[in-house]
Image: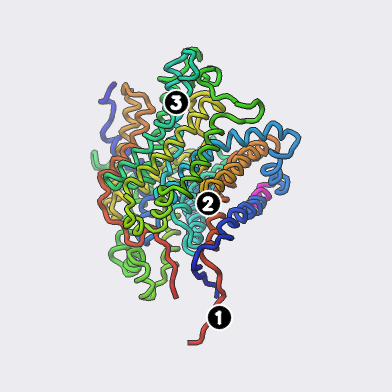
Amino acid sequence: MIVLEKREAPSRLWAWGSPVMAVLLTMVLGGLLFAALGQNPFTVIRTIFLDPLFSEFAWFYRPQILIKGAPLVLIAIGLSFGFRAGVWNIGAEGQYIVGAICGAGVALALYPMDARWLIFPTMVLAGASGGWAWAMIPALLRVRFGTNEILVSLMLVYVAEQLLAAMALGAMRNPEGMGFPGSRNLSQYPSAANLELISGSGMHWGVVAALITVIFAYVTLSRHVFGFHVRLAGQAPRAAKFAGVNPARMVLICMGLSGALAGAAGLFEVAGPAGQISIDFNVGYGFTAIIVAFLGRLHPIGIMAAGALMALTYIGGGIAQSSLGLPAAAINLLQGMLLFNLLAVDVFTTYRIRLLRKEVT
Amino acid sequence: MDLSSINPILFFASLMVAATPILLAAIGELVVERAGVLNLGVEGMMITGAVTGFIVAVATGSPWLGFIGAAIGGAILSQIFGFLTQYLLSNQVATGLALTLFGLGLSALMGQGYIGIKAPSFPDIHVPVLGDIPVIGPIVFQHDPMVYIGLLIAIAVWFFLFRSRAGLVLRAVGENHDAAHALGYNVRRTRMLAIAFGGACAGLGGAYLSLVRVPQWTEGMTAGAGWIALAIVVFASWRPGRLVLGAYLFGGVTVLQLNLQAAGVAIPVEYLSMSPYLATIAVLVIMSAGRSPGSLGRIFHAAR
């Protein structure tokens, strides 16, 4: 009989080995899935995971890894603090949207003023504050009324999507857009544009912010007392209470931090790669970031690697869509499968397998 | 704006229809949570049910077979969650989220060739005698069969949980899994069965959307209905009677909002469309006093 036996301490080897195992397992299971769809599994896996890096057109795809990875990493870092402390912010997608709306609102209100030194920093601030404020709704409700933050933050995603549509069709619609929905293109407004810093590299201010956040998060978690409190609150809530960690404050800080980072990610996206507030502005980064956070072991460096990998699957998925005719949904399925596999493989981090012989009683 | 254009009889009749998918998904989740398992994957199971139900119904021409297919589809998907959380002892919140993401992807992939097709019709039944009562007849007794099946399931769940021995065991497992285990009850098996039931009900709820309410298949068509179902379980304090009430209340908000849109209220459609979600939040804030099952969301690892 096979039984699981709890390890005395989580295995470090498995803690870092399981994401790798999960990715490999996903390639195998994904291959089977694509075979079932009538594709050659080897071609599909190569297209998704290798072509963005090594194919003939890789010079075009490589910058995309930074562009798509930056929002994922920014959001996932914020989420990881909460997930460690047992605060479940599932509504990063909504905070991302509201951040973009607030940031773009600043730019559109000041258009066509020419003052980049003032406008762009204000936009970043407005974006982060917008995301922060949106995240404060579930945080305050949880602290004040004990409302489940998972459900409230998620409901607010749908509210934010409607707000986005209302903005794209109403208040923020481009007056020179011949009645089409969508705002002015911010990437063509020099004072507000989030431009590439080095031409052809994909490096924009959002990427810089993501890198700074990774370093900042790493230092906070490993060196600062707040990082210690976050880990303590998640692993031993009772001990945390005795150590003087205020649970309400923990909720507010973790939710606020993840909201602000998601909001900033939204702003960098709307001012750069996306360019404008439109109905289909959000593409699910807020949800994919949850996978990124777990895949990166809630550790800043891990999250950076996981963000790059997820960005790769987005790009590879796009290539597979155009060159192999693979449906876009297949990539979402692959990402969901990856999280499943990770959670499944993770059992070996805290448990080990024992074979028991039937005992004679 | 013309509020008199809202016909009260039609309003209450469509309220029952709007509430049914949420009711079905929520009653399944109620059983799952009573067994001490928090499955956040309702949305994923619902949408998978919506697409499997639609595919089966289109292929066979029978909505009934569609509903059966949807229930089976939802139950199969829920067993992935069950296996991970009960046998591999994974975190239930994270696994539930994974189930939702996976279900959304899976359904979009499965439903590719079915966009724009119309579902076979599922006629309303006119309950003899009762359906002829003025006012109440058209409101309550002239719906499609699933409206009544949903209510029957709710009654059956109440009877099972509070009037049967197996229900008592299920609640014991949910309240204190260690004690239930010590008494010799099979915690894992009980929970796996509860999870399967939850998946089947979520599947039915999803299929009701794609086969009756819309009735078409579009990607992401559940639009948060699964999450609202989760909220209604909390609102109901894990009691079937209050759950039905909650689902109808929610149905009322949805229909009122749609009616106001049709009546041409001077509020943009987008803001009206927010109302079901805002109402859900409001309800959660007001009703967060209930006590959840004791072992809800905790990992069960039998010590030996």
Q: Position of A201 compared to B101: left or right? A: right
* x then y, percent, for residue A175: 46, 13
Mark 1 vs mark 3, CA separation in Å:
64 Å
**Does mark 3 fall on the same chain as mark 2?**
yes
In this rendering, would B116 be left or right of B40? right
Q: Give the residues in magenta.
A: A32-37
Residue beneath label 3, please? A103
**Which residue position holds label 1?**
A357
Which amino acid, mark 3? Answer: Gly
Name the amino acid type tagged 1.
Arg
Mark 1 vs mark 3: which is more N-terminal? 3
Contact (Cβ within 8 Å) of mark 1 with mark 3: no
Determine the CA span between mark 2 and mark 1. Answer: 35 Å
Residue that numbered label 2 is attached to = A297
Residue A79: x percent and y percent? 46, 44
Camera sees residue B40:
no
State which quarter of the image contains the C terminus of chain B: bottom left
* Magenta span contains residue A96: no
